[in-house]
Image (cartoon, rainbow, N blue to C red):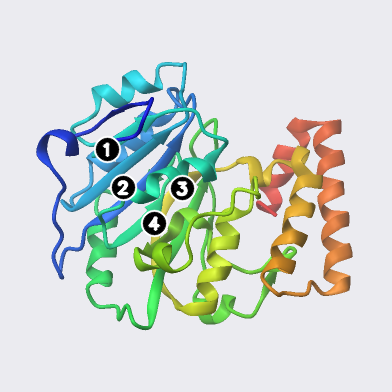
Amino acid sequence: MLQDCMEGGRELTYGVKQGSPKQPLITIITSTFNAAKDLHWTIESIRAQSYPNIQWIIADGASKDGTVEILKQNEDVIDYWFSEPDSGIYDAWNKALPYIKGEWVQFLGAGDELYSKDTLSYVASVMSLVSVREHRIIYGKICLISEVTREVICERGIPWHEMKNKWQGMRPMLPMHPEVYHHCSLFKEIGKFDTSYKIAADSDFLLKCKRITEFFYIDYCIDRMLDGGVSSNPKMANQQIYELVKLSRNNDYKIPLLLFFREVIKYKIKEILYRLSPVLFLKLKKIYGRN
């Protein structure tokens, strides 16, 4: 039990679910802060899953908009939740790590949805066949959806052999984090997310994973993720550039010089376009894709 915070969930009454070799327990971690408007999409997505062995942990940052009341009302599907002040999404995730009981772990955003009711059933069938000694990261594809209409903007995800040695922006190419399942042993070996990053700690963690395990790709859509998060906000261009340079340096990657200048120019153009006309910027992004 955490000190000086609210907590709840079905685990406190019924105990922890148990997995099996063919149906491993999958832990999903969601960070929330004043997420009352969109959280119901995630709740109903997980409630609809045909797969039984799910542990859902919600780390709330002391929300004041009714989020905590929603958590209390949905303890049939939320296995454990707590609410206390945190310093951001990565701090919230770190606070949730000690409560992981599953063999595999996914981080799902508040307002995001699992792609279909059979998503976890399909993923679990793959997990039961994958050799953990070789592959401790499993990932698939992701659909980016509009924050307003929830229509699909684009689909992302390519096989590991196509991604492994390529660059994306100012860092090595990686899967988008919500489509990733991490074997629980990685958190014991690597540790927590680095909270000195505000928008790139998930990429930092995956680069550390890349050093010690192969990634296993499944050609299957995992998640419907809201477009427009902090890491894609053009107003954060300077922070993005700073953290991506720091990320590559700290993980012993050298950004090719021409790529660096190209990406800096691209980030600054996006920032200028957004400041001139957010509506035009969003229209152009929809036409030409997220990048």
Disc 3 residue type (three-letter) = Asn
261 vs 67, nearest the viewer:
67
> Residue 27 in the image: x percent, y percent?
30, 52
Q: Which residue is mark 4?
A: 222
N-terminal of the two: label 3 or label 2?
A: 3
- Report the residue that reaches farthest toward the left: 14
Q: Is residue 65 visible?
A: yes
- Which label number is shown at residue 94? 3
For the residues labelled 3 and 2, the Cα–Cα distance comes to 10 Å
1 vs 2, front mark: 2
Q: Which residue is mark 1?
A: 80
N-terminal of the two: label 1 or label 2?
A: 1
Q: Quadrant of residue 272?
A: top right
Q: How crowded is the residue under tag 1: few (<14 C-alpha within 10 Å), some, or many (20+)?
A: many
Which quadrant of the rendered structure holds the N terminus? top left
Q: How crowded is the residue under tag 3: few (<14 C-alpha within 10 Å), some, or many (20+)?
A: some
User: At x 55% / y 69%, what residue is drawn?
Assistant: 208
161 vs 53, nearest the viewer:
53
